[in-house]
Image: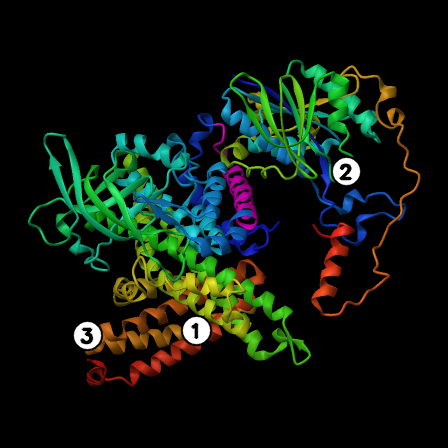
Amino acid sequence: MSLKIILLAKQVPDTRNVGKDAMKADGTVNRAALPAIFNPEDLNALEQALRLKDACPGTTITLLTMGPGRAAEIIREGLFRGIDNGYLLTDRAFAGADTLATSYALAMAVRKIGSFDLIISGRQAIDGDTAQVGPQVAEKLGIPQITYAEEIRLLEDGNIRVKRRLERGIEIVEGHFPLLITVNGSAPECRPRNAILLQKYKYALTPTELQTSDSRFAALYTQRPYLHIDEWSVADVGADVVQCGLSGSPTKVKKIDSVVFQAKESKTFDSTDDAIESLMVELINNHTIG
Amino acid sequence: MANFYLDNPSLKHHLQHPLMKRIVELRERGYADKDQYDYAPVDFEDAMDSYDKIMEVVGELCGDIVAPNAEQVDHEGPQVNNNRVTYAPGTQQNLAAARQAGLMGLSVARRYGGLNFPMVGFIMVSDMIARADAGFCNLWALQDCAETLYEFGNEEQRRQFLPQVCAGSTMSMDLTEPDAGSDLQAVMLRATYSESDQCWRLNGVKRFITNGDSDIHLVLARSEEGTKDGRGLSMFIYDKRDGGVNVRRIENKMGIKGSPTCELTFKNAKVQLCGERKLGLIKYVMSLMNGARLGIMAQATGLSEAAYREALAYAKDRRQFGKAIIEFPAVYEMIANIKAKTDASRAILYETARFVDIYKTLEDIQKERPLDDAEKAELKKYKRLADAFTPIGKAMSTEYCNQNAYDAIQVHGGSGFMKDYPCERIYRDARITNIYEGTTQLQVVAAIRHVTTGTYLNQIKEYEAAQYAPELEPLKKRLSAMTAVYEEMVKHVADVKDGEYLDFHARRLVETAAHIVLGYLLLQDADRNPEFRRSAEIYVQYGATEVNKMHDFILNSPIEALGNYRC
């Protein structure tokens, strides 16, 4: 059997290597100072999608992302690794969306894409860490969801078996299509970009990017439809503008504090076995280790 | 999160050499593939952009996957079970990543599923992989056997095997035997043609075969019964799926432990003849070896790069007597020399790769259409240069990688002697580079005729005639002076008119030529990019001193002195 997979992915600021200028004076993220990357757990999700594609020839993977124009970069990153096409949801009216408005916009775009067997995404994005968008999309589409997936296997009866990584163990569940799966960071790393695909898709552009790109490749773009990355606006996906972006977001950020961790207390232990034992017990009890 | 391409700007510098325009134009046959393959470049800029982007992918793969696996691969190594090799888990992961990244048929033509990269690109990937894990570099770079299969195999064999290589099948070249090491004319593995099966069959033993349990083997065997020399040897292709070759054991080596070195037994193994009978050694293996030697130069350069980075990082970090040890002249001189030798190795590595690219591609074009006179002259010139530069490049870069690894440990002091730092692995891995694919001593044998016939001198004069930035003039003057000394040394030895005397001083003469060539190459690098100025200064200073030393030795060793050395 072949599957129709939609991958929800996000371009995020790389918050893993935060420097001094990562936050602006007003407490918001300084996106200009941080490189924009493919959200790490979405890459884990992409790898799972690609493995399903490897196992089921004929499977297609469509990447759907919402963001500013430059988020088309992650669609190209996906194309370099084996997805089939991508859509960029981009519109000023989408800006400032919280998880509710984001999942609304994504669900509308999924409806516009049409039929699918599986929606897959990373567990959460490293800029917000909410882990809400995937589940909310499933709810809005009225399909079942499996979260924290580490391994996905297609069964002979057409169902799917998923290994879930939970805090204190693993759980194995089964589900049937259509459904949504969010993938955990403990799942295998995404494969590298492929040299042939990279050369094939490196000039894949959105219509907006085409306007500012090297005109040498305009002819190529016309000849090769697979180089077209579609951009969708609020109107394109038939969304209600009030439910999008800032106006559709009940979450309001009141205040952000920059917290600097400082050790305030100190304890001294003797170098006896008993003292070390009590230190270990304390560290385990307060979940520092174990 | 390291990227071995982006963190090493000298790679981009070499990728963007002016000669690349000609190389890519030849390699791409005027960009003819663009209408047939959606991943073929449309013009030079497009091709260069793709190389750059793919090198970045390789850099990431090396930094994020291969390098972090290197220590564990070194500790665990491959295993043999039931006559088959199992790679270390890290090696398996590296191979899987290289396959997924589409890096297994890098230089193979697109019509067989490859990327059609020039040799410069292939070498650059080897350079980066060797820095990450020199042992894995062997497994990856053996795909270069595909080049020999392409060059000498027939179209049917190309169609059968090359797409497999591009899809990720591994390769090996089975040459060495217990009694045939440096002297391959002594190969005994028996090839007999079975009339009943209508195929060739191999029987016998091979030893020291790198990646000997590969999917596709090129095997040197004696097809002409009763012969004893190289003219009785032919080359064969063995497909592992046909069976008949077993791994008896793998060697327990000092370094490159991730790369299995196998003893193979051939029992009626079904094979195909590659090319013509009797040309196995005298034509095909010589070609194979030249490619392999370039590969080892890349491996050595990558190891030197790794040694440099380990030494530099430690010297900046380690504090003694109240300051970082890199502030002491004894330490910073060592590190500056490691860097200069690394840059010099890389300079001759890519210069040689460019020569190989031009002549090999012209040879290939010659199969499609007759070359015009200018192209014929171009082919001849670059073939001769490639032939001359391969042995000195291999000799110098592999000796330097040993010296650099040695000095990297010295910078680490006692800690470098412990298993805690990568420098000890680099040191062990480096040791084979000046031994296999022809020892340094054999490189000297291959190079000495270019001393006596003047290939090196002519090329040196060509470098000398080029224009350099005014601030580089003093260095150029120094290189000119070294050239005069070289000419005097060559004349002194030649005038004695004695073969043994020439052999005795051959290494000194070859090294002297090499110091001048490397000095000029760094001068060219510095002319194009000021970042190389320091290495050019340091290298010429070093080379000039070495040349004077060897000059002194030759002038003070009359032919009678050989008697003191003979056993």
SS of the residue under disc 2: loop
SS of the residue under disc 1: helix
Residue that lies at the very extreme toward the front in this rendered image: A274
Query: From what the image shows, is residue B324 above or below residue B229?
Result: below
Instruction: Inspect the image, locate mark 1, and give the three-letter code of the amino acid beneath it.
Output: Gly
**Residue assigned mark 3:** B500
Label 1: chain? B
Q: Is residue B152 left or right of residue B314?
A: left
Q: Nearer the viewer, mark 1 or mark 2?
A: 2
Q: Which mark is residue A129?
A: 2
Query: From what the image shows, is residue B177 above or below residue A237?
Result: below
Find the distance from the CA under tag 1 to the CA under tag 2: 58 Å
SS of the residue under disc 3: helix
Give the extent of the magenta segment.
B38-64
Instruction: Inspect the image, locate mark 2, and give the three-letter code of the amino acid beneath it.
Output: Asp
Q: Main secondary structure of the magenta part?
A: helix
Q: Is residue B369 visible?
A: no
Measuring from the top left, give residue A182's x and y in whole percent.
68, 29
Q: What residue is rendered at 51% in x and 42% in y?
A: B51
Label 3: chain? B
> Disc 3 or 1, which lies upstream in sequence?
3
Instruction: Inspect the image, locate mark 3, and give the three-letter code of the amino acid beneath it.
Output: Glu
**Residue assigned mark 1:** B543
Measuring from the top left, give residue A107's x and y in whole percent.
75, 20
User: Badge 3: how crowded within 10 Å, few (<14), some, or many (20+)?
Assistant: few
Q: Is residue B419 left or right of residue A25?
A: left
Measuring from the top left, give residue B71's x and y in whole percent.
50, 56
Q: What residue is rendered at 47% in x and 50% in y?
A: B124
Measuring from the top left, give residue A37's x and y in whole percent.
68, 40
